Image (cartoon, rainbow, N blue to C red):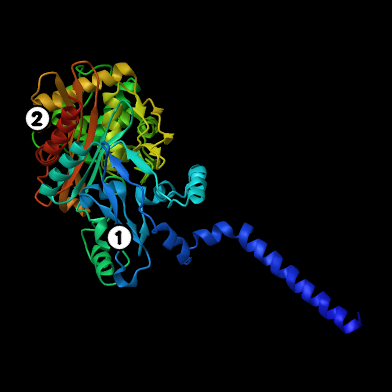
Amino acid sequence: MNKPLRRIAIFCGLLVLALLIRDNWIQYVQADSLKDDTKNRRVAIARYATPRGDIIVDGEPITGSAKTNGDDFNDFEYKRTYKDGAMWAPVTGYASQAFGATQLESIEDGILTGNDDRLFFRRTLDMITGKKQEGGNVVTTLNAAAQKAAYKGLLKQGKGAVAAIDPETGAILALASTPSYDPSTFAGNSTKVDGNAWNKLQKKNNKDDPMQNRALREIYPPGSTFKVVTAAAALEHGIVDSADEKTDSPLPYTLPDTTTELKNEGNIPCKNATLREALRVSCNTVFGKLGVDVGKEDMLETAKKFGFNEEQFVPIRSSASNFPEKMDRPQTALSSIGQFETATTPLQMAMVASAVANDGTLMKPYMVDKLQAPSLDVIEQTDPEKMSEPLSEKNAQILQSIMETVVEKGTGTNAQINESGVTVGGKTGTAQRGVDNSENPYAWFISYAKLDDGSSPVAVAVVVEDESANRDDISGGGLAAPIARDVMKAVIDSKK
């Protein structure tokens, strides 16, 4: 071979070698990143080539799939559908051909599409037999009756959220948020229909922000419901020893190191009130002083044991509730009655109620019971997991007795369930809002139900953003407590 031909042969060989290296680099090194690239339309086409698996509640699917019929020249064969979509949106999130996916639809996308690595063997068999790929199912812990009661109750008020938990396992039973949205309205890829529906829901176009998951992502001042945490801290750290001993609580009470008096709402008997009476009538002065007596470090420790200052993953992310880590003594007093910088999600306050109901043990909240293969074989099962012990069994039972007095003859009487063998404990709250409390407050109620066998099947937190709420704890009892009662009753009735 002459010299020019040899050079051409070497050059061509180098080109082939470079092509092979590049091909292998793309197939093996860049495969995952290319597969996940949002601009890779083939992946999206494959995702919607078959029906998705379903999200299951009480054994029934709350999702489905429908043929697109080539809408807008759509090359996606199937799109997502939802049953009672607005009611379940805080749980499911959405799966949209045009706008992606959120919440369970996103977190468990691998199972729902059948692309999860744990389904590899199944996919291989389907490929060999020529069967179309199928998605698996996500079986939730939700209780359909409780969710319906929560959503129906919130619709009457307009805006708010509910979180309900099984105190003994941590299983989430209800997660409702209003106003809401129907994910079906933008599940497809139509630029006209789906795009218009999407734009109407965006916060810049809708001040009510219906796509906000208020049960998990909205941070509210908890108002007087936080006094349950302060009572737990006072019991745990030996500031008080029982429900009915008098506290050292002067009236008026001046915030330490200041000349500012801490006010109570109305003319209520708070001077040296017992813990039971102070929680029953919701004394700011008693709980503000208790917070100072406990001290900021121990108050913070107790709040953290209840789950404050830490994000929760259920598996949807829940925003971290906040109890201030840096505060002086007056700020400690205000924080201990749910003011200053104390802020919380409804899920967090349901966790507080559930820990008290479960004799002081807080179980880790979770919403997915199990993941199923298309064959319904269980791929993954969630086992209940202890999260912490915010208070001892003895102190939890003292606090139960006090919270039950609140419902029996305090501000929470609207949460009573008039059935034999059912006892309800609770706490109302009205959270100040706006500069100098200029806006109408949030109405809160947290509670639990206990049966005559000592078990506690449900704990609930309700917050209502109501423009007509009164500026006292009765608003929590008037607006939020009836919703909590209906959710608790729905859970109890479903177990009969």
Q: Earlier in the sequence, mark 1 or mark 2?
A: 1
Quadrant into which the N terminus falls: bottom right
State the residue at coordinates (10%, 19%): 420
Outermost residue to the right: 2
Asked whether the viewer can see residue 271, the reply is no
Examine the rendered structure and indicate whether residue 494 appears above or below residue 330.
above
The residue that label 2 is drawn on is 413
Amino acid type at image mark 2? Thr
Q: Give how far apart the Cα atoms at labels 1 and 2 are.
A: 51 Å
State the residue at coordinates (9%, 45%): 470
Examine the rendered structure and indicate whether residue 27 appears above or below residue 214.
below
State the residue at coordinates (60%, 60%): 30
Q: Percent from the top left, x then y, of residue 232?
A: 30, 26
Q: How many marks?
A: 2
Examine the rendered structure and indicate whether residue 61 appears above or below residue 277.
below
The quarter holding residue 419 reads top left
State the residue at coordinates (29%, 65%): 69
Q: Which mark is residue 67?
A: 1
Q: Nearer the viewer, residue 439 or 256?
A: 439
